Image (spheres, rainbow, N blue to C red):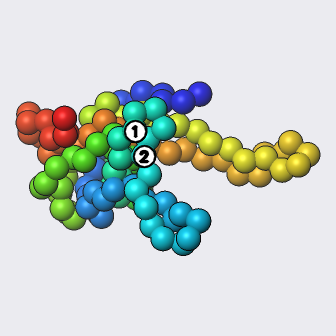
Amino acid sequence: MQDIPFISEGYKFMVTEAPTMKMKEDKNGELAPVADKRTGTIPFVVMLFAKPRPVEGRRPGKGEEIKVTLATDPGDGFDEGTYVELIAPVLNTWQTTNDEGRITGSGLWFKAEGLKPAGLGAVRDAA
């Protein structure tokens, strides 16, 4: 399954690395932007610290750093330490198998249409 929508309001997200263009090493060993296969646009990536919001009667969660692929450039103002909300977040799964068909690795990766400052009404995703 791909692009599974999820509700992210149960987490606080803090930028740990500002958004940058998604890059990949080409066959010459040089970094080049990666275009989205469906849209042709250049996605961005941002590193966020995701920490569960406190819930009364429960021990607070620890949180972890996640990488989120953004559909477009989120614009300025998303520096390290900024609290943000994800616009239309989804998650995807991946797995690798060996020659015998056994699963050798699996995981999740996160995507969103964009970012907006936490607690503010202004949407900050590029058109």
**How many numbered marks appear?**
2
Q: Residues within 10 Å of mark 1 (few under 14, many from 20)?
A: few
Judged left or right of residue 107, residue 22 is left
Give residue 76's position: percent from left, percent from top: 13, 54
Residue at the bottom extreme of this rendering: 29
Picture layout, residue 90 above or below residue 105: above
Residue at the front extreme of this rendering: 28
The type of residue carrying mark 2 is Ala
Q: Which quarter shows the C terminus?
A: top left
Q: CA distance from mark 2 to mark 1?
A: 5 Å
Q: Residue at x 86, y 42 (%)?
A: 101
Mark 2 or 1 closer to N-term?
2
Give residue 116's position: percent from left, percent from top: 17, 42
Give residue 88's position: percent from left, percent from top: 31, 30
Picture layout, residue 28 above or below residue 93: below
Q: Residue at x 54, y 72 (%)?
A: 29
Q: Residues within 10 Å of mark 2 (few under 14, many from 20)?
A: some
In which quadrant of the rendered view does residue 55 lie? top left
Asked if the residue at tag 1 contacts the one at tag 2, i.e. Cβ–Cβ closer than 8 Å, the answer is yes
Q: Which residue is mark 2?
A: 35
Q: Residue at x 56, y 70 (%)?
A: 28
In which quadrant of the rendered view does residue 85 lie? top left
Residue 12, disc: none
Picture layout, residue 20 above or below residue 89: below
Q: Residue at x 58, y 39 (%)?
A: 93
Residue 40, disc: 1
Front-most of 57 and 95?
95
Q: Which quarter shows the N terminus?
A: top right
